[in-house]
Amino acid sequence: MYLGIDLGTSAVKTVLVDANQRVIASESRALTMASPRQGYFEQDPAQWIEATFATLDALKASHGKELAAVEGIGLSGQMHGATLLDASNTPLRPCILWNDGRSAAECRILEQRWPALRTTTGNKAMPGFTAPKLLWIAAHEPEIFAATRRVLMPKAYLRLVLSGEAIEDVSDASGSLWLDAARRDWSDAALAATGLSRAHMPRLVEGCAPAATLRRELAQRWGMAKPPTIAGGAGDNPAGAIGIGAIKPGTAFISLGTSGALLAPTDHIAANPDRVVHTFCHAIPGMWIQAGAILSAASCLAWAARLFGAPETELLAPLGARPKMPSPVSFLPYLAGERTPHDDPTVRGMLDGLSHATDRTAIVQAVLEGVAFALADCRDALGDAGIAVAEADAIGGGSQSGFWLAVLAGVLNIPIHRFADGETGAAFGAARLGRLAVTGEAIASVCTPPQRIETFEPDRVLVDAYAARLPAWRELYRRRH
């Protein structure tokens, strides 16, 4: 038996997977974000631990026999967060999250200090990444910076609590701007540019490698026969790739979680930082992931649900199974700023084309279409890096909406595929990494694609209609600048 724990932004999801790769049970606990100022987003690391332990306590109560047989644990996590610890490994402040936009000025400083940043990391300095956050801390909270002895990303902090060891995998580390992406190792020049050294960093491992062992007292708490091995694990999107078997060039997938992304595994670095394409190490050796990323995806639908005071399912129901034509309303999904292709943490969302005839359904459809148009920007940025996307699998909570996937097929003009359990992709991928760390099996024999249950083919009428709409949608951003 194997466990996959996905430390997301809105929830911790834990899945229990058997030797036949069947999900035996799953548990989830919600997380909340704090926003002390506009554009600032933080979480208390204690939340992560409480939620993770709650999922495991619940699995012990419902599936104690299976939990006792767990041999390997894989961790997946939201990327880029800055968790600052003191000499006793106690958090010094709330974690600054991936969608936090406060460090735009520090990004410019970082690129001036270290001109080799883009060629070494494969990325452009943006506020979402970890390194600029530390420059902001140094400038605005110098006493916190002075007390910092270790910097961990969220899942590495979780692993520290579970095992007592500070270890990070290279996929998550490559979202920090401190990693030499080609060498898959920390860059001393990058660390020096932020006033840090390797002493502040966790030890690095590959995602499928054994990294640590669960603390004995925690293994006893959850009734495990012996302390399981904890794998290196992966950032959420690389873990999602492992969960759907996206481990070789030519595959692509769309993540529709709190944030969104269009991702393509490669066997070489195909960086395009000027168009804000992200370069991450994959969770398996010798592979990378190129990604266009948007800061708000399914969170846009959650925003609409709060705005209208109705559950998301109630908002989606009147839309039907497939769109018949584009909404008369246009939506910019930049509720927390944007990454690909704009790198603009200050831009905000917009509804355009409202009239007395506009109803809730038109606005909800526009929200889904706006996210799809933003992913079209990601597709074009990947294309400029030489990566052509001919079809894509969909994962994340948003993948459960057939209407949304039909919109994506029309906007991107490619087939979009759906899996039965796409919303648990990252946690399932983490469980696979936990298995590989224990068994040492061939990666391809474990990381197989799950069965697709539905394919959304592009509708020619919609393809033409969305292609005609896209230039006007892009002009909305230009008009704001």
Image (cartoon, helix red, strand yellow):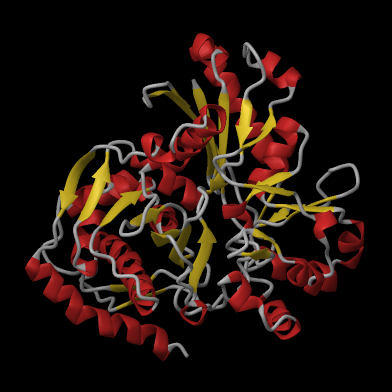
Horizontal side of residue 94 vs 471, given as left or right: right
Q: Residue at x 68, y 35 (%)?
A: 49
Residue at image location 65% in from the left, 14% down from the top: 226
Residue 412 found in image quarter: bottom left
Q: Quarter of the image holding residue 187?
A: bottom right
**Relative depth, front residue between 383 and 419:** 383
Looking at the rendered structure, the number of numbered marks drawn on it comes to 0
Percent position of residue 24, x then y: 40, 21
- Residue under the point 47% across and 77% down: 272
Q: Return the x and y of residue 462 as percentages of the image width and height.
A: 12, 68
Question: Can residue 481 be seen here?
Answer: yes
The vertical placement of 143 against 445, above or below, is below
Q: Is residue 77 found left or right of 307 in the rendered image?
A: right
Residue, far left: 461
Tell me the residue at 55%/49% (across/down).
9
Above or below, 331 against 265 in this view is: below
Percent position of residue 339, x then y: 50, 72
Which of the 4 image quadrants contains residue 74?
Answer: top right
In the image, 16 versus 462, the foreground residue is 16
Left or right? Give the position of 285 relative to 204. left
For residue 14, say whether it is visible: no
Name the spot of residue 386 as percent of width and height, x first: 35, 75
User: Which sits in the foreground, 118 or 354?
Assistant: 118
